Amino acid sequence: MIGDPILPDSLVSNIGNEPIDFSVKARRAQPLRNSLGLLIFGIVWLAFTSLFVIAFLGPLFQGREVHFEANHVPVVASPDNLKPVTMPSIILGIFVLVGVLMMVGGLVGMFKKGGYFVGTPKRIVHFFRGTIRSIDWEQFSGDIEVSGNPAKGSITLGMRTGRMVSRKGGDRYVPDTLYISEIQDVFNVEKICRQRIKENDPTPVI
């Protein structure tokens, strides 16, 4: 068996008498690059949106008027008459909120722990903050990405389930993923995952 962390009692009870292939404790909920990517994108989004906020609402904060057109009709807003800018301000506020949420999501992802992962011949079990999730190996597609070194590495397991995402050029199917991030013996754990997925592959052999 690979790994030997002290497992929570409820997780041990869930595993029961099943043979354990590996048991590891993930330092993060997802690879660091994912969280950094979201954080950087949120900062760029917020900075870009802030330019519009400053350009449009800046004069009002300085006590000056703002002139613009709405439905080809000239409109004037002032500190004493903010009604004309109510709707534009709400729209700009939504864009700002999106940027803030992306930044918060990136920061939370950077510090969120990954919990425990236990692999058995038939399934992989994830324990995090009292919640146990069990996934049969047959639910994984065999698409595996591994990075890092034996002292600390990450595994991304692609699943057969997923969702359709609308993008320019048409819809695209995005498979669900399971992250096992920043664990020891990552390459040995990856070999076991690949072996178990292949053994439990429900696809008929041609």
Image: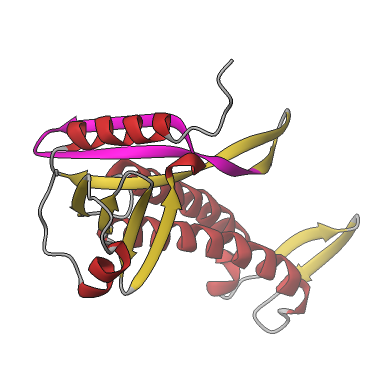
| Residue positioned 51% across, 48% down in the render | 48
Q: Residue furthest bottom?
A: 80
Estimate the x, y position of residue 59 in percent, counting from the top left.
Answer: 58, 66
- Magenta segment: 140-163
Most distant residue in the top direction: 206
Left or right: 27, with 55 as reference point: left
- Give the camera-side residue of 97 and 192: 192
Q: Is residue 20 above or below residue 104?
A: above
Marks counted in the figure total 0
Q: Would you place residue 128 above or below residue 144 in this image?
A: below
Name the quarter where the N terminus is drawn.
Answer: top left
Residue 156 point in image, percent of width and height: 36, 38
Q: Quadrant of residue 79?
A: bottom right
The secondary structure that dominates the magenta segment is strand
Q: Is residue 77 visible?
A: no
Q: Residue at x 66, y 42 (%)?
A: 165
Q: Can the viewer see residue 177 in this picture?
A: yes
Asked if 45 appears above or below 58 in the picture, the reply is above
Asked whether 135 or 54 is in front, the reply is 135
Q: Residue furthest front?
A: 17
Report the colour scheme. Answer: secondary structure
Q: What residue sits 44% from the left and 36% below the top?
A: 200
Q: Residue at x 59, y 54 (%)?
A: 52
Picture coordinates of residue 104 (x, y %)?
Answer: 40, 63
The quarter of the picture where residue 107 lies is bottom left
Who is closer to the viewer here, 118 or 42? 118
- Magenta segment includes 32: no
- Percent coordinates x, y for residue 27 in the rendering: 20, 54
Does 158 lie within the magenta span?
yes
Lateral position of residue 110 relative to residue 3, left or right: right
